[in-house]
Amino acid sequence: MVKSLGNNVLYIGADDLDIDLFEGQYVVPEGMSYNSYLIRDEKTAVLDTCDARKGEEWKANLEEALDGRQPDFLVVHHMEPDHSSLAAWALGRFPDMTLVTSAQALKMLGQFFPGLQTEGRVQVVKEGDVLNLGAHRLSFIAAPMVHWPEVMMSYDAADGALYSADGFGKFGALSECGFYGRDDNDWACEARRYYFNIVGKYGAQVQAVLKKAAGLDIRTIRPLHGPVLEDELGEYIRLYDIWSRYEPETDGIFIACASIHGGTLAAAEKLADILQAKGAPKVVLSDLSRSDIAENVEDAFRYPKMIVAASSYDAGLFTPMYDFLRRLQIKGYCKRTVAVVENGSWAPSAGRVMREMLGAMKEVTILEPTVTIRSRLRPEDLPALEALADAVLA
């Protein structure tokens, strides 16, 4: 797709509707976009390339957008292969083109492209450096660990454009979710899932970049995945601020359940009914065995309170819950209140393991007591569920 963004800036990225798993683990039913941009000024700059999966389409887009010009610069904001796989090809195709990137990215370049010769063709940039193209001037912003260590963003005052690398990205092809953020029916849904699973561990680093961006006159955000953002930028930035401070976004309770034979799930469903009857603002229940773990991670961060309900298994914890809690540990889950429900037919062990895993997370309050179900929910278990609901809502 080649699309004019105005002021001699063109979008030259590509949609991938055939991909089943992004980064080998995230389901993407609406595909992915690999965004790339071209600035045609006194000097011409290509901003990032594309994933090799869509390499031929990107090459055709580039040639169409160049319209016979020879590009002066290839700017690599981020070395991850879904954005830089065509860097070596581009340097070979245009022998007079200079590579513009960070020192850390340059080190990685040889890892991804062994034997690539770049001597005399590289301009290493750091925080505050400016690439002068004419009317357009790219000012570079260091964004380490958002979400790789070599990441740079850039700002072009001519358009008020922030080229944000993976920041402000989302899952979904542009043909499915819309080219601009205003065309996207629910940008936050897949942007949230993307953020917490891909960027979310690095909240402090995102906060650092947001502080730098606060001093800029940003009129559009052009990420490497997902729609170009132009309207309601304050809302996108507000959400990123909430997410990167690990603060809850929506008042409610997330119930994560891992059930082997249905008994634990029945108890979790009953607990959800009790919470709703007691006036809980919102209750979201997920069966971890049958749902997307990335979406469950998203919901765990979205709400201030969570209930984990799981079966005991091999003297430990049923594996869907173990995998979920381990993923939360990796992603930096914190600042939340959690209640625990376990099920065990002879020697309940799930509660112990869940409490140990939660206890290793920062600023997580674990409510007392753990509720124990023996195989199936019975009438005599209801007072304990009622009391747990009261504790969660307190």
Image (spheres, rainbow, N blue to C red):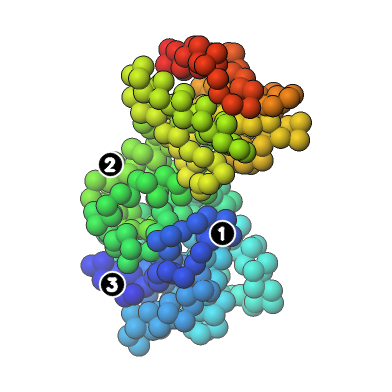
Whichever of callouts 1 and 2 sits on the residue coming sooner in the sequence is 1
Residue identified by numbered label 3:
3
Q: Position of residue 143 (x, y in %)?
A: 50, 49
- Identify the disc placed on residue 234: 2
Three-letter amino acid code at disc 3? Lys
Q: Position of residue 155 (x, y in %)?
A: 37, 55
The residue positioned 61% from the left and 22% from the top of the image is 373
Q: Which secondary structure, mark 3?
A: strand
Residue 356 makes an appearance in the image: no
Q: Is residue 33 above or below residue 278?
A: below
Residue identified by numbered label 1:
23
Q: Are marks 1 and 2 in contact (CB under 8 Å)?
A: no
Q: Position of residue 100 (x, y in %)?
A: 50, 66
The residue positioned 28% from the left and 46% from the top of the image is 233
| Residue furthest to the front | 379
CA neighbours of label 2 inside 10 A, class few (<14), some (14 to 19), many (20+): few
Three-letter amino acid code at disc 1? Glu
- Identify the disc placed on residue 233: none
Specify whether 118 is left or right of 200.
Answer: right
Whichever of callouts 3 and 1 sits on the residue coming sooner in the sequence is 3
Q: State the count of labels.
A: 3
The residue positioned 43% from the left and 63% from the top of the image is 32
Q: Are marks 3 and 1 in contact (CB under 8 Å)?
A: no
Residue 373 makes an appearance in the image: yes
